[in-house]
Image: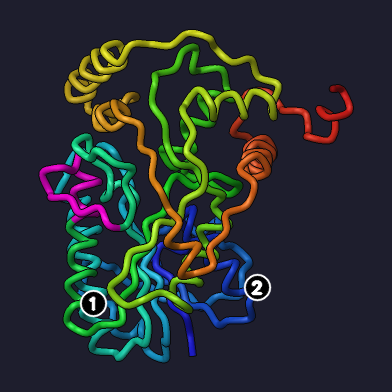
Amino acid sequence: MFSLVTGANGFIGSHLTRFLIERGERVRVLVRQQSDVRSIAGLPVELAYADLRDAASLPPSLTGVQRVYHVAADYRLWARNPGDIYASNVEGTRNLLAASRYAGIERFVYTSTVGTLLSARTQQMPDERTHLQLGDMIGHYKRSKFLAEQAALEAARNGQPVVIVNPTAPLGPGDWKPTPTGRILLDFLNGQLPAYVDTGLNFVPVEDVARGHWLAAEHGHIGARYILGGRNLTLKGIFGLLSDLSGRPMSRVRLPYAVPLMAALADSMASRVLGRPPRIPLDGVRMARHKMFVDSPKASRELGFQPGSLEAALDRAIRWYSENGYLKERVRDRATRECAA
């Protein structure tokens, strides 16, 4: 029997694929014909070509499959046609849920996002008990993931063996695209962030997120949500760790929120005129107005999820970015930096 991974060529999906293979599982990956599969090149996987937006293309990929890990998502904070995001994230999820129900899949793990639990109106530290509405979501990406999560919850209520994981911001090697979080790290490492805003995120090693998916399949309760999180850190805090690990100087300038907001508004108007993606996504700036911290003991208590060292994950990420040509200047390796200290 196979485990099917959608989005296996993405950041979390590629690490999940490697984790399952290391466990000795047979893995089938669902990708589109035009997908960039560098992140899983050379891995002993079976390729299944299908499109989540095309319901008729999915059933063959589920033959002989025991578990489905639905990691694929259109993760963009801006799109020329926002309908594309909803087609992939919402309709694609509904299509795969329906096909999996028909195929009798034993366990379906849906990868949501911690963003579905975050809202400016939340008074206490958000956790899995937080229930929000569509109107609380900022931007098309978060709205699409909220709707997809609701579809997964409805499927579970109707008897489908669905478990939901809500990863926070993953860090580590192999972020080929890179993701919006990876872009923040790269901008700092390349000296393109001379200032910072007073915001924060929960960060977690990507390898632990991958293992958390398997733990959810093994031990998760049907219809439950599990935050796969690590450490709450301000942006200044994460830049401090990056500075210590890379030797890059850190800016002491903190910008008031109005400055990046005005810059994003201007960039958004320019992007519409020039027909290019904005360099400063407006939705991303709006999200950054509030610290996106969460409380996540449930995954530890019910799944045995234990995230590892964030510093070690950042060090792996820095070395990977350096080795793969993402950095303008090569960063000294950690051993050299420690000897110099």
Q: Position of residue 114 (x, y in %)?
A: 34, 50
Circle 2 is placed at which residue position?
22
* Placement of 68 over or under 76, stated as above or below: below
Residue at 69 percent of width and 29 percent of height: 245
Q: Which amino acid, mark 1? A: Ala
The colour scheme of the drawn protein is rainbow
Task: Name the N-terminal-most of marks 2 and 1.
Answer: 2
Q: Residue at x 59, y 68 (%)?
A: 19
Residue, disc 1: 156
Left or right: 160 as drawn, with respect to 246: left
Question: Which secondary structure is most common in the magenta stretch?
Answer: helix
Confirm whether residue 233 shows in the render: yes
Q: Quadrant of the C terminus?
A: top right
* Range covered by the magenta-colored residues: 129-146
Q: Is residue 140 magenta?
A: yes
Quarter of the view holding residue 266: top left
Residue 291 covered by magenta stretch: no
Question: Which is more foreground, mark 2 or mark 1?
Answer: 1
Q: Position of residue 255 (x, y in %)?
A: 38, 11
